[in-house]
Each structure stands twice: as C-alpha cells, then as structure tokens.
Image: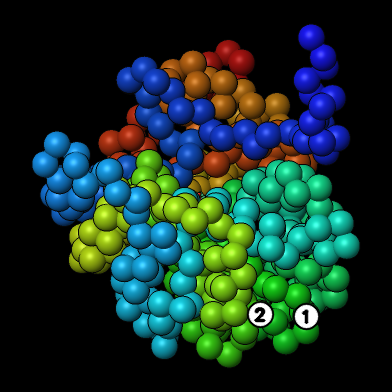
C-alpha cells in the first residue's frame, strides 16, 4: 500500500483538526461544556419543519434555495440598521462563514490575525488553507490590546466579542478605535452577542471593512441545525458567495432558521432566563466561593477554581474538572494556554443544572484530592 498520507498536500498531512467539546451519547450528563442553550428552540419549529418536509418527504427531492434568499431577507429585516438582503450571507453554521472568510482573504502573504486566547477554530481554518497567522496575546486583564491590533498587518483580523472562553465583551468605542487605524478586514465574531449589552451592528453602516458574524447555535438553541451568517458590505458578501458551496444550507435548516428568527418574543424570554442564571452564577463563584471570575456577557462563566487550601492553578482546575467529569457534570478545561489553564469554562444551564454543578463542586472541595 502506498503511504496515503504522503500523497496528501504537505500542510494537510501535518494538520491538527479542531477538537470539539465532548458530545456524550448516553444520557444522565449535566452538559455544560459547549455553550448550547439549555432550553428548547421556539415551539414554532416543529410545524415549520413538518411543512418543509411535506407529505412523505416529497419536498426534499428538490434542492434548497441556493442563496438562502428568503432567510437572508428575514435576517436583514430582523436587524434593521439599514441592512438589506445584499448585506447578508448565510452559512452552514457560522464556522462555514469563518471558513469562507479565510478562504477569500487569507494566505501565506495575507495573514489571518486573531487574539490569544480566543476561538480555537481560527488557526485550524488557516492551516487548512496553508495560510499564515498573526496572533496578539491578551494579558490577564483580558482588555483589548487596541494599539497592537491597529498596528497589525493582518489582511483579516478575527475578534471574538464577547470573547471565548472568557466571556469578556469589547465595547463599540474600542472597536471604533481599532477600525480608525486598521486597514484590513475586521471580522467581529458575535456568537454570544445576544447575551451582551452592546453589539457591533450599528458600526456596519460607517465601516465597509467590518464583518459581523452571528450564529443560531447559542441564543437560538439550534446548534444541531447549523445556521450562521455574515453581515457586511455587499461587495464582501459577493466575494463570500463566490467561494461558498452552491447549496451550503439545506432546506430544513433554512426553514428552521426562518421560523426561529420569526419568534423573537420567545427568544427574548430564553435569553433573559439564561442571563439571570448566569448573573447568579457569577455572584456564586466570585462572591460566595471567592473564585476569580471574569464578568460575563455571554452564556458561559469563566472561573478560576480554588481548592480547599485556597490554591488555584492548572492542577487545581484539572482536579475540579476530573471530579465533575467523574460525577457526570461536563464543563470545559483549556490546558494549552497559560491564561486559560487555571480556569474552567462553564456553560450556563438551567437553574436545576447549575444546582447540581454547585453541589458537585462542594463535594469536590470536601474530597481528599481537592
Ligand atoms: C460556537 C461558536 C461559533 C460556532 O458557531 P456555529 O454556528 O455553531 O458554527 C463561532 N464562533 C464562536 C466564538 C463560537 O463560540
């Protein structure tokens, strides 16, 4: 047999794939590891999907709308700010959109910039393209290094706001300072913006080099349906349309997304519940437990566990992670970066799930290896 890997392009042969959070197949887990919504999607979805499938699934014979045009128009109307269908590109999840942006704008001589820590998919997408990265490190304050981004020579800079895995949001005033000097494309990945106090949409009309990326996976409880989108100047949207798969969003996903986005009152309630649980969680970790915890404007909490002796650090957070895991409570630990290794990222669940988490952490603190 030939060495099949050596037949591949060299940069693919040495590629490290993205590591998604665990998706256990058996039941009984308290799943607080991938920032999914703890509540179901809009009750309108079931009927919309049945209607789209049609009798005997006959409607699925036909290809979907190639541009997701009806969905683009729903998205534009939903956001206002003078946005029209021409300002929207829909993807198979926002990961698809991020991939299209890297494909269209980044290569060896056109670096993709991003901060560390932030969403760990960016470097994987760049590696797939054999591109070059330009990274900017946060310090423990997690404040935006504005001057360094302004001076970045990246062709496109990917900024997660609110940031992952910290939950810290950057203000529009800060983004405007970046935009005043940065000459490349600024991509603001707003996966968690529905949980934040502010978002970058009002800046789109004034800055043609700004791209805002959104997803239905988190706030809309639709991670399984894979819909995300970009909002940007029509010229940028046109470039993304050139490189995307011609039918990149399937029929059922388009129909589900239209139904969900049409039910804002339902989601206002879901988001309000998640934010209330989050804020109580931050008070518990930062207040009652005295653990260093970043202010969160997302649907997760980034906290630095202290053991029974008041110590923290990578080994302590790993010990808490392992104890939670052994008790079927799943959270996320990011050991590969010094600024994230002492922490746990906890997705906001229902109040009942957060109660189980809290009791299990109490048990960890009383356990011999804490
Ligand atoms: C979850 C997440 C995404 C991925 O969203 P999908 O639409 O599910 O692909 C993108 N960016 C960030 C920062 C995320 O946390």
Task: Please tell me whether mark 2 sits on a helix, a strand or a loop.
Answer: loop
Query: Which residue corresponds to the image point at 41% horizontal and 82% vertical from the top-left?
Result: 84
Image quarter of residue 113: bottom right
| Residue holding disc 1 | 183
Q: Is residue 296 visible?
A: no
Q: Tell which residue pokes out farthest to the top in this image.
A: 1
Q: Position of residue 269 (x, y in %)?
A: 23, 60
Determine crowd level at label 2: few under 14, some 14-19, many 20+ residues with C-alpha closer than 10 A.
Answer: some
In the displayed structure, does residue 203 sit left or right of residue 139?
Answer: left
Q: Position of residue 43 (x, y in %)?
A: 16, 50
Q: Position of residue 329 (x, y in %)?
A: 43, 26
| Quadrant where the C terminus is found in the figure | top right
Which one is nearer the viewer's eye here, 296 or 68? 68
Q: Is residue 248 visible?
A: yes
Q: Earlier in the sequence, mark 2 or mark 1?
A: 1
Number of numbered discs visible in the structure rendering: 2
Query: Which residue corresponds to the image point at 48% horizontal and 67% vertical from the top-left?
Result: 89
Q: Up-down: is 272 above or below 282?
A: below
The answer to whether the residue labelled 2 contacts the one labelled 1, judged by CB atoms less than 8 Å apart, is yes
Query: Which residue corresponds to the image point at 42% horizontal and 64% vertical from the top-left?
Result: 67
In the displayed structure, does residue 110 sit left or right of residue 142?
Answer: right
Which one is nearer the viewer's eye here, 75 or 368? 75
Task: Please tell me whether mark 1 sits on a helix, a strand or a loop.
Answer: loop
In the displayed structure, does residue 275 sit left or right of residue 331?
Answer: left
| Residue holding disc 2 | 209
Q: CA distance from mark 2 to mark 1?
A: 8 Å
Determine crowd level at label 1: few under 14, some 14-19, many 20+ residues with C-alpha closer than 10 A.
Answer: some
Query: Which residue corresponds to the image point at 53% horizontal and 53% vertical from the top-left?
Result: 245
């Amino acid at each position: 047999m030939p060495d099949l890997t050596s037949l591949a392009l060299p940069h693919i042969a040495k590629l490290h794939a993205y590591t998604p959070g665990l998706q256990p197949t058996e039941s009984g887990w308290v799943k607080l590891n991938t920032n999914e919504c703890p509540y179901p999607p809009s009750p309108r979805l079931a009927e919309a999907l049945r209607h789209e499938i049609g009798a005997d699934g006959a409607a699925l014979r036909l290809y979907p709308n190639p541009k997701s045009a009806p969905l683009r128009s729903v998205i534009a109307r939903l956001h206002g700010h003078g946005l029209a269908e021409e300002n929207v590109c829909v993807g198979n999840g926002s990961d698809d959109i991020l991939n299209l942006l890297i494909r269209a704008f980044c290569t060896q001589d056109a670096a993709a910039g991003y901060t560390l820590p932030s969403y760990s998919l960016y470097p994987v997408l760049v590696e797939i393209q054999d591109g070059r990265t330009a990274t900017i490190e946060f310090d423990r304050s997690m404040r935006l290094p504005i001057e360094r981004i302004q001076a970045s020579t990246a062709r496109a800079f990917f900024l997660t706001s609110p940031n992952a895995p910290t939950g810290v949001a950057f203000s529009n005033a800060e983004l405007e300072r970046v935009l005043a000097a940065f000459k490349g494309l600024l991509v603001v990945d707003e996966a968690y913006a529905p949980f934040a106090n502010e978002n970058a949409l009002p800046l789109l009309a004034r800055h043609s080099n700004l791209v805002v990326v959104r997803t239905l996976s988190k706030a809309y409880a639709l991670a399984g349906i894979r819909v995300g989108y970009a909002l940007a100047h029509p010229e940028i949207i046109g470039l993304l349309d050139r490189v995307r798969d011609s039918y990149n969003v399937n029929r059922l996903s388009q129909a589900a997304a239209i139904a969900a986005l049409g039910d804002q009152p339902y989601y206002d309630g879901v988001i309000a519940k998640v934010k209330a649980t989050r804020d109580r969680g931050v008070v518990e970790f930062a207040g009652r437990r005295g653990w260093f915890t970043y202010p969160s404007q997302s649907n997760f909490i980034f906290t630095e566990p202290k053991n029974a002796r008041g110590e923290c650090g990578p080994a302590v957070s790993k010990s808490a992670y392992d104890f939670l895991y052994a008790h079927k409570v799943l959270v996320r630990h990011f050991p590969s970066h010094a600024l994230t290794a002492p922490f746990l990222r906890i997705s906001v669940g229902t109040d009942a799930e957060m109660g189980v988490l809290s009791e299990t952490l109490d048990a960890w603190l009383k356990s011999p290896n804490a």
